[in-house]
Image (tube, helix red, strand yellow):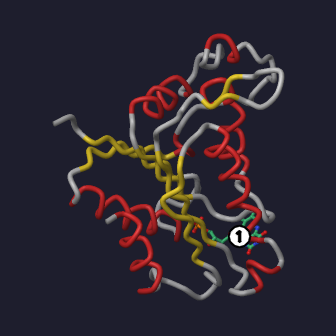
Amino acid sequence: MSEKVLLAILGSPHGNGMCAAMLNCAIGKAEKNGYHVTKINLYEKNLSYCKGCRACMNTQTCIQKDDLQEIAACLQKCQTVLLAAPVYWANVPAAVKNLFDRLLGTAMEETNTFPRPRLKGKEYLLLTSCNTPFPFSWIFRQSRGAIRSMDEFFKTAGMKPIGKIVCAGTVNKKDLPKQTIKKIERCMS
Ligand SMILES: Cc1cc2nc3c(=O)[nH]c(=O)nc-3n(C[C@H](O)[C@H](O)[C@H](O)COP(=O)(O)O)c2cc1C
């Protein structure tokens, strides 16, 4: 039987923050379930900005040579992607948005009508955290904005969601709430 491969991306500058805790919780469960996990800390990577040249539409990967090729190769090889990124201005942090931009031609092919997905058959789990408490985090489109942005990339790439988990109201939280842990474990089972 071939090995199950999982790519876990931390899209927060805080290695010990809420998103890191959520991601580590999911990784722990995945490893118990026999996944081989590759973890990427986006803020430790060297990634230039997307120049919008669109060469990747033909090459399927970016022509700028930095750490993008390594991430794109992991994405193509894995079956499951976990992405943990905090809410920044009701969206994802700039580093995460830039990753999506740099992966344009890896994720999709342009046609005269709708984009054709290039990462079909894979699945993804989204993890996010924000200061705004629930339900305002959702009503005022804080966590909703970040989830929508992440969803747009993976859906367009042809991937299927296995969960979208928000840890809201993080201002005075030191540990992951039990409820959040349960939700993550359920998605990874
Ligand atoms: C630049 C910046 C922008 C932020 N924007 C929002 C926001 O729009 N809404 C919100 O609820 N929290 C916002 N936050 C708070 C973070 O989402 C929150 O502290 C989160 O739990 C951090 O996760 P981390 O510990 O994994 O980095 C922002 C934080 C920063 C640094």
Point 62% across, 31% down: residue:
117
Residue 55 in percent (x, y) is at 73, 13
Q: Amino acid at mark 1?
A: Ser
Percent x, y of residue 92:
71, 56
Identity of the residue drawn at 55% across and 43% down: 159
Using residue 27 as the reference point, say whether residue 104 is left or right of it.
right
Q: Residue at x 22, y 38 (%)?
A: 3
Where is residue 31, by image quadrant? bottom left
> Foreground: 175 or 109?
109
Q: Secondary structure at mark 1?
A: helix
Ligand 1 occupies quarter = bottom right
Q: Nearer the viewer, residue 57 or 92?
A: 57
Circle 1 crowding by C-alpha within 10 Å: few under 14, some 14–19, many from 20: many
Give above or below for 177 relative to 35. Answer: below
Left or right: residue 30 compared with residue 71 = left
Q: Residue at x 83, y 21 (%)?
A: 112
- Residue lying at the far front in this picture: please name it: 113
Say which quadrant the N terminus sits in: top left
Relative to 4, say whether 116 is above or below: above
Task: Measuring from the top left, give residue 172's x and y in whole percent.
Answer: 59, 88
Query: Which residue is tagged 1?
Result: 143
Vertically, is 125 above or below 95?
below
Mark count: 1
Relative horizontal placement of residue 55, taking residue 25 as reference (left or right): right
On-image quarter of the C terminus: bottom left
Mark 1 CB within 8 Å of ligand 1: yes
Image spot of residue 149 (x, y percent): 73, 53
